[in-house]
Amino acid sequence: GGIPLLPLPGSPRYEGKLERIVEIALEDAAALQAGGVDGLCIENMGDAPFSKDRAAPETVASMGRVLSELRRQTSLPVGVNVLRNCARDALAVAAVCGGDFIRVNVLSEAFVTDQGIVEGAAADLMRARRLIGAEHVAVFADVHVKHAVPLLPRPIRESALDLVERAMADVLIVSGPRTGQPPSAEDLAAVRGVADVLIGSGLTPDNAEALLPGADGAIVGTWFRQESDLSHRVDPERVRAFMVAVGRIRGRSGRVPGYPQPGSQTR
């Protein structure tokens, strides 16, 4: 379950209430866990416009505060995504505050985004992960990330292979073109078998039958919110309904889409 945080200290829309931000994140996490999700992922969605690849110190500290509080509340796996592509900062938060994985939007290649051209973070990130002894923190990498286009168009499977073989990604994420929009079944099929694959956007009970059997799990944010609006709170009934649908798919397939364990891929 995705937990998009309200604007954090230092961002243009911050309202000066960090304690309330933490409180809301904890309440949303509790609702997601009660509904039966397999894991959680926090991200600084409210901080737009986003920094390209290095977050402000107050952003890193704030996300560390949220993750630390979540770690005390839940035994579920918890991940961190520091937007837009602040992979080194996300690693620091996860390593120090008990995170299990980080999501990296651009781990390899170069993408044209609303932040400009964002380049792959793999070389610095993987050296840092080794240096600080954080190899238990898995790296979930987007393939052809949403809200972006590759600087050099390539087949999605070729990009996926390079992410795992050359950039050391542990898990791959396939999304639609924008937040809340699903990936195509064709893209999921193209990436299957390279590594564990998560659907990164747009999964709902209506399309889960078609899409989820082609993946190992999903990160769901938009649909879990009231009226499918990320600015609204988690709707426990939506979470439960979604997980019931997922349970039916799991039962028929014999596979268990869920949280891929850190380090499950061959590096």
Image (tube, helix red, strand yellow):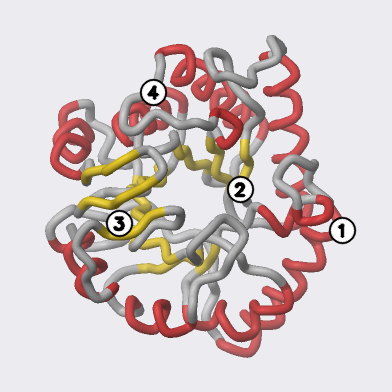
Separation of residues labelled 2 and 1 (CA atoms): 16 Å
Residue occupying the far right of the picture: 237
The residue depicted at 41 percent of the width and 17 percent of the height is: 56
Residue type at mark 4: give it. Answer: Ala
**Which corner quadrant of the image does residue 204 belong to?**
bottom right
Residue type at mark 1: give it. Answer: Glu
Figure check: 96 above or below 77: above
Residue type at mark 2: give it. Answer: Gly
Separation of residues labelled 4 and 1 (CA atoms): 35 Å
| Residue placed under numbered mark 1 in the picture | 237
Closer mark to the observer between disc 2 and disc 3: 2
| Residue placed under numbered mark 4 in the picture | 55
Q: Are marks 3 and 4 in contact (CB under 8 Å)?
A: no
Closer mark to the observer between disc 2 and disc 4: 4
Q: Of residues 71 and 173, which is closer to you in this image?
A: 173
Taking 255 as reference, is 101 left or right?
Answer: left
Q: Residues within 10 Å of mark 3 (few under 14, many from 20)?
A: many
Q: Are marks 3 and 1 in contact (CB under 8 Å)?
A: no
Q: Of residues 127 and 206, which is closer to you in this image?
A: 206
**Which corner quadrant of the image does residue 148 belong to?**
bottom left
User: Closer to the N terminus: mark 2 or mark 1?
Assistant: 2
**Count of numbered circles in the view:** 4
Figure check: 121 above or below 173: above
Residue type at mark 3: give it. Answer: Asp
Q: Of residues 149 and 216, which is closer to you in this image?
A: 149
Q: Position of residue 42 (x, y in %)?
A: 56, 38
| Residue placed under numbered mark 3 in the picture | 170
Figure check: 206 above or below 106: below
Q: Position of residue 3 (x, y in %)?
A: 63, 41
Q: Residues within 10 Å of mark 2 (few under 14, many from 20)?
A: many
Mark on residue 2? 2
Q: Are marks 2 and 4 in contact (CB under 8 Å)?
A: no
